[in-house]
Amino acid sequence: MPAAKKNGQQTVWFQNPPVIVATATIVGAKEGQGPLGHTFDKVVEDGYYGEKTWERGERRMLAEVMQTAVSRANLQPQNIDFLLAGDLLNQIISANFTARDLGIPFIGLYGACSTMYESMALGAMLIDGGYAENVLVGVSSHNSTAERQYRYPTEQGVQRPLHAQWTVTGAAAAVLSRQGTGPVITHATIGKVIDLGQGDPNDMGAAMAPAAADTMARHLADTARQPEYYDLFVTGDLGVYGRELALQLMRQKGYDISTRFNDCGVMIFSPEQDAHAGGSGCACSGVVTCGYLLQEVRAGRLKRFFGLGTGALLSPVSTMQGETVPGIAHGVVIEGR
Amino acid sequence: MKDDQPLEIQKKQYKQMVDGVRPRPALARNVFRAFVVGGLIALIGQFLINFYQGRGLPLTEAGAAASATLVFLAALLTGLGIYDEIARFAGAGSIVPITGFANSMVAPAMEYRGEGLVLGVGARLFTIAGPVLVFGIVTAWAAALLYYFFR
Amino acid sequence: MLFLKAFIVGGLFCVVAQLLMDLTSYKVTPAHVLVGFVTGGAVLSAVGLYQPLVNWAGAGATVPLTGFGHLLAQGAIGGVQQKGVLGAFSGGLAAASAGIAAAVVFGYLAALAFRPKG
């Protein structure tokens, strides 16, 4: 017998759609100069954010957005039932160490750059399942901590290829509640890990586009909806070329979403910023969703969108051993109320 | 691409799709920049050799002194955060000269300063320099042995 | 004239490396290029092709990392001539010692003196 709150193979629906009652965002200098700079709560000019290491700076950003989101929701940390968070660093130290300081029951998540949407989907399930009243979700990424872990030290002289992306520095957090006012999460579609054999660690967009297209098509099939039902499909960090690939893959699956499809990685930087194919990282979909997209929903300019976090599930070890890059995409439907 | 096809065929078709979308590197531009910057660094090296020779050093020592000077300059520019900007422009033009070798030592070493002097700085100095020395020394050793036995 | 030759030869080595990086798979990283150039330089030197290039183009041949390979190979071969088999071990590093020590010392000091900008 299929589960009571499940639609089709991969989609769950929420009986009482959980409410995104508060959000908070912080970004680095480069993101602040981008086209969405004005939509973020705070722009930090110093990559270290006054700390001794970049890793500590990243944690400070994550802790700050979480505290801000909780206080904007008029809650105290003890009112939060679960904290769901993750980041890109080995053993998700940013999330783990931030949770150490917050004292909220914590579930650490790793979905690479899809973690924001992964945590929103799980948080909504916890609430609608009756296991939580309030859930805090959050992610962070930092260009300098991620680049040196996954690629090269930042001061090393390398020429990035045109399809490379720029890891976003920043952090985002949201409080999901059973009741309250704000945009709501009505559905979540959990993605499958898909690998179509792309191995270039510089081309995350090509690695993740098949997963994104698969989750989008699966969501439409599971809900028996047409693309026109949504104002916008928005992926996390496919970048310029990954977005194009996802469009082509969707067309092959019989869906034309070209008039209503964007990507947070494309939106966050302008072409003059030398970010090549666009932004990436947990914070990319995190800050664009918790910043610009939810502001648009609250203002009524965006009625309903299907957002997807896209993750490239590689590690430096897997790359050096010549493995290809598996991708994943989790989506949630967010509606204005 | 149909989902019901075997994965290997999907991968092949997807590779074609990616090749059609992915931008080609701006080859002519990259090559030109690499040539100019790489040539300029060699030119500076030649000036340094002539300078040290003028100071009375024999050619071999002048060459060593010039290399050390270039290494110093590259370490300084890396520390100031300028060398990676040059390399973004110059590509191989700033990787292949000995300055690129110096940059590949300084960049990881300074970046891993937070992990301590021994396992951070000390070990990371040789992230790329280590392999370079290994292959250079082994090749030179093998060449010398061949020379010894077969000349 | 030597300056012009140094510029052209030094530039051409970088062109070869740029083509290697742009036209081959993503698996060819800058580290692979550097290792390849050192090895290639040592081989060219051992078969007697590199010294003429150094004589002709000066720094154009010694500044690229192939020159480092040349230095190692010539040192090792010279060591063999003077000291026999032991020289194959000691000669290479002895010849290249100034460059290596400079890179280690300046690298260490720079790592202490500077904080990366990111």
Image (cartoon, coloured by chain):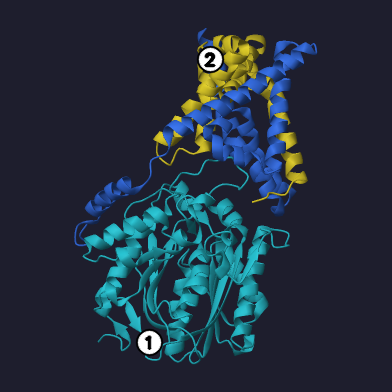
Q: Which residue, given by chain and number where applicable, does mark 2 sit on?
A: C46
Q: Which residue, given by chain and number where applicable, does mark 1 sit on?
A: A14
Position of C81 with respect to A212 (left or right) is right
Quarter where residue A191 is shown: bottom left
Q: Residue B100: horizontal and vertical position, in percent?
A: 61, 33
Labels 1 and 2 within one chain: no
Are there few (<14), some (14-19), or many (20+) residues within 10 Å of tag 2? many
- Identity, as a three-letter code, of the amino acid under mark 2: Ala
Position of A220 with respect to A200 (left or right) is left
In the rendered view, tell whether residue A6 sits above or below residue C57.
below
In the rendered view, tell whether residue B73 sits above or below residue A202.
above
Residue depicted at x 47% and y 86%: A19
| Dot in front, 1 or 2 | 1
Secondary structure under badge 2? helix
Residue depicted at x 61% and y 77%: A66
- Between the C-alphas of marks 1 and 2, the distance is 73 Å
- Identity, as a three-letter code, of the amino acid under mark 1: Phe
Q: Residue A189: horizontal and vertical position, in percent?
A: 35, 75
Q: Quadrant of the N terminus of chain A?
A: bottom left
Quick check: can you spot residue B124?
no
Furthest residue toward right: B55
Q: Chain A rendered in what hue?
A: cyan
In the rendered view, tell whether residue B114 sits above or below residue C111.
below
Q: Nearer the viewer, residue B38 or C92?
A: B38
